[in-house]
Amino acid sequence: MENAFFVEFPTMETGDLHVNNFGYSVTNPCHKYGPAVRSFYLIHYILEGRGEFCTDNNRYPLTKGQGFLIEPDYQTEYRSDADDPWTYVWVGFSGKKAKDILNSIGISQAFPVFTCEDKLHPEQYVKDMLRHNSANTSDLYRQTAMLYLFFSCLTKANKSSINFESRGNVYVAHAIRYIQNHYSEPIRIEELARYVGLNRSYLSTLFKKHTGLSPLKYLQTHKGRAPALYDPALHRQHCFLLRLSGAGILSQNFSSDDRSLPHAVPCEGAVQVRRQPQKV
């Protein structure tokens, strides 16, 4: 279970982009959702705590500043940590352009995890949706605008991978994404090379060509955005442990301007606004 505040709209398959739901949640220890299949796209962004996201037999330990995508018709499961549970925001959406938008951002079922820099705050756009949550035309346009700004943050977070892919070097893009997706695990350079299907020497050559750095040096230069890399040849182990505070309460995560958050259904059942415990 979790303490969630969220808004839901009827699912619509027509149109270019449609907001299905959005919300904010402080989860309880070991909060779990799934295995389950969604009928729309859903992105969670983590504000505090730790947990694990599972899809396609892959497990992704995730913490503050990271997020994950759930695509429709795929079975997924996620769980909050027992000692440091997640606090997160989420937004669900659908529409004819949803898939193309996600492809342009660089997240997909194959690469469902992303990491945002500290200066990026995608949660602010979800909180704006929560403050302007009715189903009137003005708020619906605003919610869609906030969704595009949310996408803009994710695009900035993934711009290095997108640039590599646009230049045709999928190997380097996959290597960087693998590092991001295995944030809390020590990674051997040999394992990284095996994952992208190259030998270690050639991967290092490509990596240096397109980033100017070796895989290990790239990691050291981007400590805040990548996990630790273990290279036995250099007799070094790096493991950056994130020490995060426990999840806060709802009132601690919204500014004084957030007092306008609603307490009731604003219009004839077209949208549902809830404050009670809810699984999302």
Image (tube, rainbow, N blue to C red):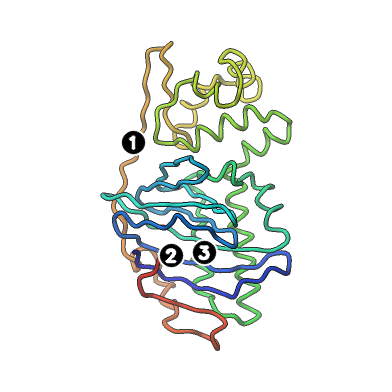
- Looking at the image, which residue sits at the far bottom? 268
Quadrant position of residue 31: bottom left
In the picture shown, does residue 111 fall above or below 90?
above
Q: State how far apart marks 2 and 1 are (Cα).
A: 26 Å
Q: State how far apart marks 3 and 2 are (Cα).
A: 8 Å
Can you give x and y, in whole percent of width and height, for residue 22 in the image?
A: 51, 67
Q: Residues within 10 Å of mark 2 (few under 14, many from 20)?
A: many
For the C terminus, the image quarter is bottom left
Decide which of 102, 40 is in the foreground and name it.
40
Quadrant position of residue 62: top left
Question: What amino acid is found at the position of numbered circle 3 in the picture?
Answer: Val
In the picture shown, does residue 28 fall above or below 221?
below
Q: Helix or strand or loop: what does disc 2 sit on? A: strand
Can you give x and y, in whole percent of width and height, for residue 123 in the image?
A: 49, 59
For the N terminus, the image quarter is bottom left
In the picture shown, does residue 117 fall above or below 197?
below
Question: What amino acid is found at the position of numbered circle 1 in the picture?
Answer: Leu
Whether the residues at callouts 3 and 2 have beta carbons within 8 Å, the answer is: yes
- Residue at image point 36% right, 21% down: 237
Q: Which residue is mark 2?
A: 24
Q: Nearer the viewer, mark 3 or mark 2?
A: 2
Q: Helix or strand or loop: what does disc 1 sit on? A: loop
Q: First in sequence: mark 1 or mark 3?
A: 3
Q: Which residue is mark 1?
A: 241
Decide which of 138, 110 is in the foreground and name it.
110
Question: What amino acid is found at the position of numbered circle 2 in the picture?
Answer: Tyr
Q: Which numbered disc covers residue 155?
A: none
